Amino acid sequence: MAPILDKFSRNLSATSVAAAAEMAVGVGAGLLVADQLGKGARQKLGLIALVAGLAATVPLLIGAGVRVNRELGEGRRTRRRLETIRHDHGFADDGDFY
């Protein structure tokens, strides 16, 4: 299971760097225009930014969950197949053997 988490963490770190860069640009732009907006406008824009950020994050989380689940499922299928091979003697139960 460790290789799966290693792949996931490598992808996650690249995504995190990109997200941090976008956040820094957004915060910088927000600080530049903060004094020019009224309180109501700042609150509305803050809410819009929050909703947009959550909407952008949901597909990333779903995609990561699907990838991890798929890789874990492949491991389970492989283990199940190996168990059937180990416990199977290779002959049909109703056959005649010579």
Image (tube, rainbow, N blue to C red):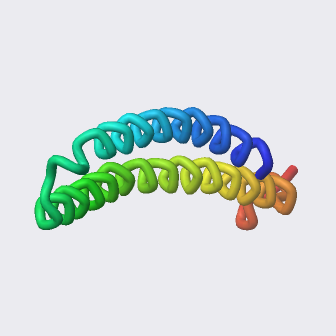
21 left or right, relative to 83: left
Where does residue 56 sit, x and y in percent of width and height? 32, 49
Q: Quadrant of residue 44?
A: bottom left
Q: Farthest front residue?
A: 35
**Along the line of sight, the residue nearer the viewer: 71 or 74:** 71
Picture coordinates of residue 19 (x, y %)? 46, 40
Q: Please identify the quarter of the rendering in which residue 84 is found.
A: bottom right
Foreground pick, 76 / 90:
76
Viewer-closest of 49 and 41: 41
At x 71% / y 50%, what residue is drawn? 78
In the rendered image, the vertical position of residue 40 relative to residue 20, given as above or below: below
User: What residue do we see at 20% from left, 65% from top?
Assistant: 43
Q: Nearer the viewer, residue 59 or 27?
A: 27
Instruction: Tell me: 80 left or right of 68.
Output: right
48 displayed left or right of 82: left
Is 23 placed left or right of 89 in the picture? left
Residue at horizontal 62%, vertical 38%? 13
Height in image: 57 above or below 26?
Answer: below
Q: Position of residue 58 (x, y in %)?
A: 36, 56
The x and y percentages for residue 16 are: 54, 41
Task: Count numbered badges in the picture.
Answer: 0
**Which residue sits at x=18%, y=56%?**
45
